[in-house]
Amino acid sequence: MSNYNKKIVIAGNILVDIVKNIDSYPKIGMLSHITDMSMAVGGCVPNTAINLAKIDKNIPICASGLVGDDANGKFVIGELEKVGIDTSLIAYSNTNTTGFSDVMSIEGGERTFFFKKGTNEDFSPEYIDVDKLDCDLFHIGYILLLDKFDAEDSEYGTVMARLLKSVQDKGIKTSIDVVSSNTADYGKMILPALKYSNYAIINEIECCKIFNLDSYDENGKLLKNNVELAMRKMAEAGVKDKIIIHCKETAFAYDVKTDVFTEVPSLKIPSEMIKGSVGAGDTFCAGSLYGIYHGLSDEQTLKFASAAAACNLFAANSVDGIKSKEEILDMAENWERLK
């Protein structure tokens, strides 16, 4: 287990989520009722960092990103600092507002996002002083939602790939996350970054879309062979240590160095306990980073990360459902899993 000398920097998207629970999703021109409304952090940086800090308060975590000089920006900074996260690498913009999402959540946890990029469209490598990074692991997300990083680079393919290469050159391990997009060119924007990633923690749709593979058949059944093929292709593209894939029913890990695949089904959660699923992927990512940080086996990491993601379902927002590492470990070992 770790002696907590290692630091993690979590960089990328920073948002505020306005979560609105609705009784149904209306057709165009029709009305539905908002039954409850709350304000919470959102995006890769707050979701992943806060969940990881709540899981294990002893891990040194630093957040990196860009917010507006506005109430939403101050809200996010306050929420990060409340759980002991170092916010010294977060910059303020005087020309744009903090990004936000209106999250429409229906009973059962399904949700729809109305998104304003805000300062996320301005966040760029100029806000990350690689020479001053004092960490052992640098995690950044989301590829496909950071305009300046997704931009083309003549030498490395994308600006993100160039940044990751410079971070690795400092002896720092790198980790990436991706957002699901209906329109993006996954291969063009993600493949270059894989070459300079030690870890990739993404979902089944994202990993398959990189290589134009179907993740589900016409009946909605997960095509596990395609997921495994995509993971192997990700390793061939350059991911150096581990590829971790999460989906609703199960999770996979591929240890590149040992050529070993591991699968762990998701926990079986009673529907009446589910309040929402906003940020479940980020919570899984936080659980995976916990496992990586502490050197857990792939099976232990997937069990822990899937239990952490299950906790996320207990709240309507991204961070209120998470539990301590002891409670998550208990869930991971004792709760029933899907068959």
Image (cartoon, grey):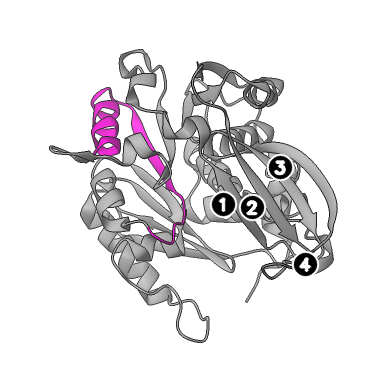
- Type of the residue with mark 3: Ile
> Residue 309 — which label?
2
Q: Position of residue 335 (x, y in %)?
A: 73, 62
Q: Which residue is mark 4?
A: 24
Position above or below: 70 against 115: above
N-term mark: 1 or 4 = 4
N-term mark: 2 or 4 = 4
Residue 43 visible? The answer is: yes
> Residue 281 — which label?
1
- Type of the residue with mark 4: Ser
Q: Nearer the viewer, mark 1 or mark 2?
A: 1
- Type of the residue with mark 1: Gly
N-term mark: 4 or 3 = 3
- Type of the residue with mark 2: Ala
**Mark-to-mark CA distance, 1 and 3:** 18 Å
Q: Which residue is mark 3?
A: 18
- Asked whether 143 or 194 is in front, the reply is 143
Pointer 1 with pointer 2, Cβ within 8 A: yes
